[in-house]
Amino acid sequence: MEPRLVLAVSAVLFTLGVLGVLLRRGAITILMSVELMLNAANLAFIAFSRQAGTAEGQIYVFFVMTLAAAEAAVGLAIVIALFRLKGTTDVDEVSLLKW
Amino acid sequence: MEAIAFYVLAVLAVASAIVVIVHRNPVMSALALAVNLVTIAGFYLVLRAQFVALLQVIVYAGAILVLIVFVIMLLNLREELKARSPGTFQKWLGPILALVFAVVLGRAMLAHAAPSFPAPVPGFGTAAALGIDLFSRFYYPFEVVSLLLVVAMVGAVLLAKRRL
């Protein structure tokens, strides 16, 4: 195992998250793809932390996890509000601001 | 031993990530996401970050995933099952853009990879090592993050409440 491989896995996972956001229309699936991307970034942080032998990378991961928790709570609350308003979570249906 | 664990984890992580973005049923996507989060925790263990691996299982696979599954069950999302598949424009342009992005990202990240990991420092990745840094050098960011959590909590309650 070498740093190259770990970073490659991280890049692949991040790209899969991007692909999920680009291709899917359900708001919850898009949120889950965002979680995939956050995790891929965390993996890169941990790999570089291991490579440098210092704890900074792990502390950034700690902060990103807190941020992900906040993001999931607010994002899912928005999805619930959206479902009440529209009766669906299809993001293509949400075009109130589009003229 | 570490190498075998790494390859098994890599295959599991990529496969579960593909299931997350491909499966039409959001509950199955959430379960695949659970598998993905646990394999990421496995990566952290292989990379000697024990404390963060523990946090990953508790915070991500525990709290965040339960929240997602809870919302899926709450909204009774059969809608997503019969959601339209992506249009032709989206179906072709999406993967192309993702591929371009992967090439750029891969080049940028691999440019800074060392040929091999150094021998681990004693005490690397333990709760003690992290806690000392967190409460000395990163004390103010830590406090700001706690403020962020309060704001997110208030925001989530306000947004999801039926009537104010």
Image (cartoon, coloured by chain):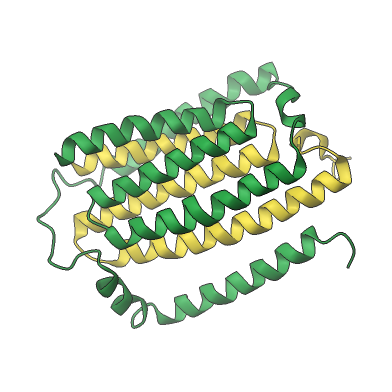
Chain colours: A yellow, B green
- Residue most toward the top? B88
> Splitting the image into 4 quarters, where does residue B55 fall?
bottom left
Question: Is residue B139 visible to the viewer in this orientation of the structure?
Answer: yes
Residue B137 spot, x, y in % from top left: 34, 80
User: Is the C terminus of chain A in the top left, top right, bottom left or bottom right quadrant?
Assistant: top right
Left or right of B74, for residue A19: left
Residue plotted at (25% across, 32% down):
B7
> Splitting the image into 4 quarters, where does residue B13 fall?
top left
Residue closest to the eye, B70 or A49: B70
Residue closest to the eye, B132 or B51: B51
Q: Is residue B153 above or below residue A19?
A: below
Residue plotted at (20% across, 59% down):
A52
Residue B96 spot, x, y in % from top left: 52, 23
Question: Is residue A1 visible to the viewer in this orientation of the structure?
Answer: no
Q: How many numbered marks does the figure carry? A: 0
User: Is the N terminus of chain A in the top left, top right, bottom left or bottom right quadrant?
Assistant: top left
Residue closest to the eye, A22 or B129: B129
Residue B143 spot, x, y in % from top left: 50, 80
> Splitting the image into 4 quarters, where does residue B119 fall?
bottom left
Left or right of B57, for residue B9: left
Residue closest to the eye, B131 or A3: B131
Residue A84 spot, x, y in % from top left: 85, 47
Left or right of A92, for residue B8: left
- Residue most toward the left? B119
